[in-house]
Amino acid sequence: MFTINNDRSKFPELDDAGNALIDLTSHKYLKLWQGPQHPGVTGNMSLELTVTGDEIVESKTHVGYLHRGFEKLMERRTFIQCFPTCIRLCVAEPDPNEYLLSSCVEELAGIEVPETAQWLRMLALEMARLQVLLRQVPGQAGTFALGLGYQWGNYIRDLILDRFEELTGGRVYHMYILPGGVRGLLPNGFKNRLEENLKLVDEFLPNVWDLIYTNSVFKKRAKGLAVIPKEWIDQYGIYGPAARAAGIMRDVRKTHPYLFYSEIDFEPFTTDESDVFARSLVRWHDLKMTVDIIRQILAKMPEKGDIKAPTPNVMHWKIPKGETYVKCESSRGEYGMYLVTDGSDKPRRVNLKGPSYTHATSVLEKLLVNANIADTAAIMVSLATCPPEIER
Amino acid sequence: MKKDFDKDALSDMYKDKFLAPENEIRFVNAPDGSIIEVNPLDDYFCQERPKELKPRKGVVEKFLNWARAESLWVLGFGTGCGSIEIPPLSTPRFDMYRFGVQMRATPRQSNVFIISGYLSVKTLKRAIRSYEQMPSPKYIIALGSCTINGGMYWDSYNTINRLDHYLPVDVYIAGCMPRPEALLAGFGKLKELIKEGKAEKANEYIQNLDWYKANQKKIIKDWNMPDYNW
Amino acid sequence: MKQLVEIIQNHFPINDIDLRKKSLAFISIHQNQAIPLLEWLKTTHGYTAFVLLTAVDWIEENRFQLTYLISNPENFTELGVRVFIDREKAEMVSAHHLWKSIWVYQRELKEMFGINFPDSPRVNESFILEGWDTIPPYRRDFDTKQYSEETYFPRPGRSTNDPAKHMKSKLYPKD
């Protein structure tokens, strides 16, 4: 079984700083580039692997293939113009971006969000989490060439996207959450149609369990692969499902309850194994929990009410000088935004911090050492890397 | 059609650009003690200029075009956010396989390149390389408004504005982001063009290779590959 | 947060205190004291998790603001430590010995803002951009629109309207 920091006698010597001393002209090592094409459900990112045989001795992450300069672009846009730009940061799960920017703006401008709007925000965020997990849970098996679950998951995800279209008008990019509230109430009959889709997810859960977690190939390959020790969690900055798989409770919804998460009854799943299998298992339980949370939200949320607090004219809305950091729980872990304003109608500086920033760079580089080439994609997907978060 | 531009001025500016250190001639010690000379430009690449794929005459070309139109193999290189709509295409709901469209892993096996959204300069370099490695006949579908005029990122310092200045585009699909149905319609349009014998952009690229290369070298600062990758 | 800030005040000269929320506060400290403060907070007050490091360009005051945001996983609080450095001589002591993830931020800042962190691992390798040869793009004096128009080929036909004037001419054409 593979463990971290095991015998390195046949591998390159380390210098004092812990870097491998690799002599490429010795014919023992080979440089191999993986990417920037997608290996599975991750984005464009490339890994510079140094291999001996089929074992990796050193890896370096190269990002920047999706860099658009969001933080610069938002500095020259007014606050309301920032929204359509900001949400395009992460295509898989755009809603946390909307939520973070609007709650940063609300906090600095001192706006209270109406209760109904807060429940609707929660619904949108949880539906976004649901559609991501429907890709991610079977996607983990896809990295071991088990593609069937991916087809099932994508089909149900499509139905959830239909509900998004009904609620917001957009299939992938929603722009539903705006400063002060949300853009609309639930359409007629929305709850019933969403409930029908949730029933499909209920059926999907045991099926995907049978398909993946009882599959001997998946078990053999995923168990014991890329173990993250507990001490790394704070030292490296590991969030969300990856931290919960290591037995440490990291869920912003529990630790810093935002919106009305304190009124929802849920208990995130934790386990101690901390390997690829455990992280995948945590995601499966997350999927189950998300369905439950959506049902609770639908039952508890008020039917009608004010959905938008009055805001000044957004064309020339100036926000007082200040800075803040707001975070929420995305499907990958803690997702935060740091906003600095200088009293003008444009933000001074926006900085987005996603869990991939540490997961895909320092953590991935460390985990890949001593792994096999064939397991690279599995390790990447188990950390849920999303390169746009790194380079923005 | 041939594009006019001041060739000398541009080629002087970007003359030595592809001689990166890794492309210089070097000597390697083989395990048996002999010394081998490695010239990457000759050994790894073909330096010859590409040739056009001339259409055949009459019914043969029609038959070939029909065959080409019915098996579009797409390179699985999602370059931007548009790639999120490609997995739904392969699921039963949209089912691109019924149109003869399927995803392939390497450029050598595919003949359609979907540029699915914005291209940063760093990706553009890889996209050009992948495109040139694809065998002819080949087609490009440009997805999303960012490939048309820059879209959301029209003022960004790292994304290109017009794809047609760097790679030849057969079909544009507008939208941000285009729905899977729009993608299927785009494939339908591409099929029509191929069957009519109008999807000749790959030949246009070869005719205007100098113009395209000048544009590409203008923005790709560390050009470390030969002019045409085979 | 208030108690913690009072404790820090007894040990370190801090100013500009901003108690933003119940779980978040910002403080400013001199450049030389910042890294010792972070180390002290990490070892004695449980601020073991590092959240982010970023820079803000205050070009009018000719200085950069570096924000180190650290968090305490025990009592769920966050503290932002602001450090102001000179814009002309943009250099800061590296903190990569404190947290294993911090070198990535420093590498990004070096590339995007041109703030140097001597001794930080791989700080001179390019991270996001490839072959960038003008001023670092996140500095305020870099004009992204102008650069884009000069470098890439803007498609003709894009027109810009001032929203206020446009709406006025649409809604009240007679005025």
Image (tube, helix red, strand yellow):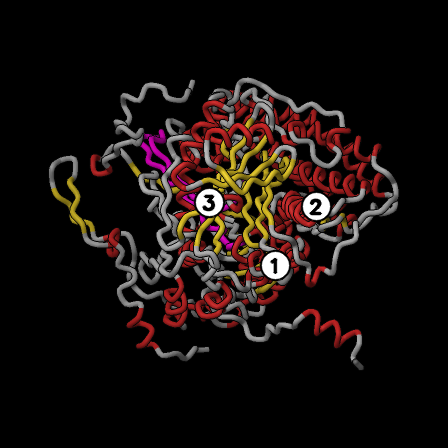
Q: Residues within 10 Å of mark 2 (few under 14, many from 20)?
A: some
Residue pointed to by mark 3: C66
Task: Give x and y (percent) for residue A202.
Answer: 75, 29
Residue pointed to by mark 1: A344
Q: Which mark is residue A220?
A: none
Name the residue at 52% across, 70% down: C154
Task: Give x and y (percent) for residue A372.
Answer: 40, 29
Kind of residue at disc 3? Leu
Residue pointed to by mark 2: B93
Task: Give x and y (percent) for residue B112.
Answer: 51, 57
In the displayed structure, would residue B37 be above or below residue A363? below
Q: Could you tell me which chain the residue with mark 2 belongs to? A: B
Residue C152 seen by the camera: yes
Q: Residues within 10 Å of mark 3 (few under 14, many from 20)?
A: many
Q: Residues within 10 Å of mark 1 (few under 14, many from 20)?
A: some
Check chain identity for marks 2 and 1: say if they share one: no
Kind of residue at disc 2? Arg
Could you tell me if the residues under marks 2 and 1 are in contact, i.e. CB atoms within 8 Å?
A: no
Left or right: where does residue A118 sit relative to residue B144? right
Q: Nearer the viewer, residue A280 or C16?
A: C16
